[in-house]
Image (cartoon, helix red, strand yellow):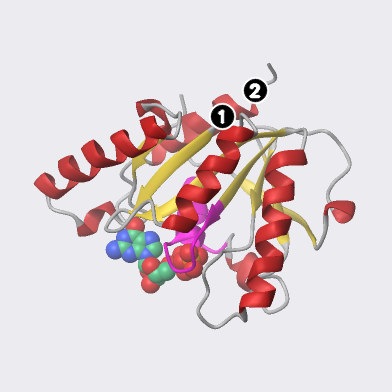
Amino acid sequence: MSDVPLSARFLTSASSLADTPRDHLPEVAFVGRSNVGKSSVLNCITGARKLARTSKTPGRTQLFNYFDLDVGGRLVDLPGYGYAKVPARISAAWRIRISTYLAKRAQLGGLVLVMDARHPFQDKDVNMISECASAELPVLALLNKSDKLSKSAKLKCLHKSRETLFALQYGADDLILFSAHTGEGAEAARNWILERLEPE
Ligand code: GDP
């Protein structure tokens, strides 16, 4: 169990599968539509206030950014998707690279899909989860910004999200209400990640 942040440090960036780290350290990847708070979630989980800023520096937003964890294993920050400002041709190319990664990366132990709890499971998210299901890759549906929901809205959101996840072949353990601002769900998210980093 981990109620302390998973300390991490930036290792490298990769622009294609050919550039990715060649060792076989287990990885958990993070992905999400733009502005869902993926960087804030990564910072919260690792306890580093500016860790994911690395991924946002000009020139790095389209790259796969790797962070080594002190406990062993690696987190991978994948490019965000659904940016209004990015031409469709370019975002389609990122999407293909992400799909290839999810399907082919042997040491990938799981994917954390960050969504906004106020409007989760948009078409692009569902497509991503379906691809993971086909690849038999564990997925954590992380519903961020839970602090924006009332208590009853949280319950409703959890209930509906569970149904959606079941239909996509995932279970209740693969769903976490999270707030990068309050830390809600951080311990559960860290534990989910640590389990996916353990060797089989
Ligand atoms: P990214 O583009 O997905 O990496 O998102 P950022 O981490 O840059 O966050 C986008 C915006 O959402 C920023 O204004 C954050 O302050 C805000 N944000 C991120 N996480 C939370 C959260 O848990 N609660 C609330 N209320 N706002 C959040």
Residue 149 point in image, percent of width and height: 18, 55
Task: Look at label 1 and name its amino acid.
Answer: Leu
Give the labeled residue for mark 2: 198
Q: Is residue 171 above or below residue 86?
A: above
Q: Is residue 53 above or below residue 47?
A: below
Q: Residue at x 52, y 53 (%)?
A: 42
Q: Give, as a single range, the part of the protein colored magenta.
A: 31-50
Quadrant for ligand 1?
Answer: bottom left
In the displayed structure image, the side of residue 138 where residue 121 appears, left or right = left
Q: What distance separates the C-alpha of mark 1 from that of mark 2?
A: 7 Å
Give the labeled residue for mark 1: 194
Residue 195 point in image, percent of width and height: 56, 25
Residue 30 point in image, percent of width and height: 57, 50
Task: Look at label 2 and name its amino acid.
Answer: Glu
Q: Is residue 134 magenta?
A: no
Where, by quadrant of the figure, is residue 98 drawn?
A: bottom right
In the displayed structure image, the side of residue 125 where residue 172 appears, left or right = left
